[in-house]
Every structure is written in C-alpha cells, then in structure tokens.
Image: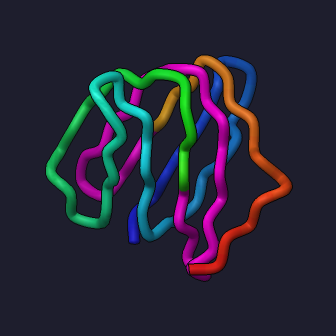
Amino acid sequence: MFKLFVATIEKVLFNEEVISVSVPGTVGYFQVLQNHAAIISSLTSGKLVVTLKNNTSSIWAISGGMFEFSENKASLLADAAELNTEIDVKR
C-alpha cells in the first residue's frame, strides 16, 4: 500500500493509504501500485479510480491537474474533483 493525497485549491478531498490508483494522464490512463517508479504527469478530465485497503473502489470525476508519485507517496492536485457516490465497486 501507499499514501494517496488528493486535493483541489479549495480543500483536501482524500488522504489515506490505498492499494492502487488509476489516473487520466494527458497521453492516456495509467495505474500506479506500491513501489512504482517515480513519476510526474499532467492530467486531463476523466475518472480517477482509487482501490482502497478493503478492496473497494472509489471513483472520482476530475477535470485536470497534476499527479506525482515518489517513495510510495502519491499527490494529486486537481483543478476540480467530485466523488461519484452512486458507485462502490467490490473487487
């Protein structure tokens, strides 16, 4: 697992340990797992899929931003983000 921090300019939206995260990079979606190589990417509008410790997924709609992963810490700074409260997917 690794620590994921998600925020907009207005507030912190998420700050917990997760199993994985899938983000909409500007050249395509990519997934990050524990011990991934360091990466910095700009983001486009799309779905942010977070796999939580209990193997459920949280799905967020984001509209661009930046993503950084290094030393098992991920930071996602979104222009705007909203949790999809209608979907809770068991894996």
**Relative to residue 67, is residue 47 drawn left or right?**
right
Was residue 14 drawn as part of the magenta stretch in this picture? no
Residue 47 vertical placement versus 49 (above, below): above
Counting the numbered discs, the total is: 0
Q: Position of residue 3 (x, y in %)?
A: 45, 58
Residue closer to the observer: 10 or 25: 25
Q: Quadrant of the N terminus?
A: bottom left
Q: Quadrant of residue 47?
A: top right
Q: Residue at x 61, y 66 (%)?
A: 57
| Extreme residue in the right direction | 86
Q: Residue at x 49, y 52 (%)?
A: 4
**Relative to residue 48, is residue 28 drawn left or right?**
left
What colouring method underlies this structural image?
A: rainbow
User: Which stretch is magenta?
Assistant: 50-75
Residue 91 vertical placement versus 68 (above, below): below
**Relative to residue 84, is residue 30 drawn left or right?**
left
Q: Position of residue 23 (x, y in %)?
A: 43, 41
Q: How would you classify the magenta stretch by its main secondary structure?
A: strand
Q: Quadrant of the C terminus?
A: bottom right
Q: Residue at x 43, y 34 (%)?
A: 24
| Extreme residue in the left direction | 37
Q: Position of residue 80 (x, y in %)?
A: 67, 22
Q: Residue at x 15, y 51 (%)?
A: 37
Residue 88 vertical placement versus 13 (above, below): below
Residue closer to the observer: 72 or 65: 65
Was residue 56 drawn as part of the magenta stretch in this picture? yes
